[in-house]
Image (cartoon, rainbow, N blue to C red):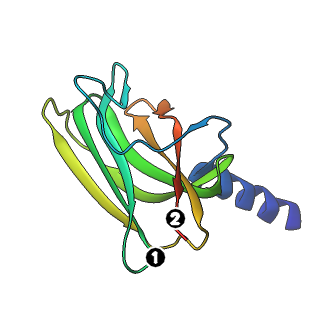
């Protein structure tokens, strides 16, 4: 019975978190026609992070199109190698217009946090952006 519980716990843990080995420094703006991320299913125009007065982190991103996507998640962690979902939005239709998203992450306790956007396609495949780093001013 103990092995079954450990196995189930492991499955739950790995379905909600993701290990990543790549990260980039934060970008606060895009210039010209440069996009933060683009592939055949998703185009992210901007992905910005900013601190709030109550030590939360404000996450803003906008998409230009969303195609055959069932779910978009914001993943966060204190290291770039282990990120867990802090926000999930389920999608039911494709979009070919600008959509803005705004999320507040109030669960960060360290001065450095790492974020990425993960998306899941209708067929179960997934993709993700590079990891970006947020450094809180001390």
Q: Which of marks 1 and 2 is in front?
A: 2
Quadrant position of residue 122:
top left
Q: Are marks 1 and 2 in contact (CB under 8 Å)?
A: yes
Figure disc tally: 2
* Residue 55, disc: 1
75 to the left or right of 52? right
Towards the viewer: 134 or 107: 134
Task: Tell which circle, 1 or 2, labels the residue nearer the N-terminal end.
Answer: 1
Q: Where's the N terminus, which quadrant?
A: bottom right
Residue 8 rendering spot, x and y as whole percentages: 72, 58
User: In the rendered view, would you say 122 is above or below 132?
Assistant: above
31 to the left or right of 109? left
- Crowd tier of the residue under label 1, counting other residues whose Cα lies within 10 Å: few below 14, some 14–19, many 20 or above: some
Residue 111 rendering spot, x and y as whole percentages: 59, 67
Q: Where's the C terminus, which quadrant?
A: bottom right
Residue 21 makes an appearance in the image: yes
User: In the rendered view, would you say 100 is above or below 22?
Assistant: below
* Residue 136, disc: 2
Residue 135 rendering spot, x and y as whole percentages: 54, 58
- Crowd tier of the residue under label 2, counting other residues whose Cα lies within 10 Å: few below 14, some 14–19, many 20 or above: some
Towards the viewer: 78 or 92: 78
At 67% from the left edge and 57% from the top edge, which residue is drawn? 13
| Residue found at the far top of this picture | 40
Quadrant position of residue 7:
bottom right
**Marks 1/2: CA–CA distance:** 9 Å
């Amino acid at each position: 019975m103990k092995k079954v519980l450990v196995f189930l716990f492991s499955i739950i843990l790995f379905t909600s978190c993701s290990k990543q080995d790549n990260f980039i420094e934060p970008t606060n703006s895009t210039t010209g026609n440069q996009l933060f991320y683009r592939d055949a299913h998703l185009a992210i125009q901007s992905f910005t992070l900013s601190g709030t007065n109550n030590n939360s982190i404000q996450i803003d991103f906008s998409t230009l199109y969303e195609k055959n996507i069932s779910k978009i998640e914001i993943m966060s962690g204190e290291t770039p190698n282990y990120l867990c979902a802090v926000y999930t939005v389920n999608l039911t239709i494709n979009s070919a217009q600008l959509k803005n998203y705004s999320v507040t992450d109030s669960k960060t306790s360290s001065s450095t946090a790492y974020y990425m956007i993960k998306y899941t396609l209708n067929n179960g495949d997934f993709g993700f952006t590079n990891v970006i780093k947020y450094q809180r001013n001390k």
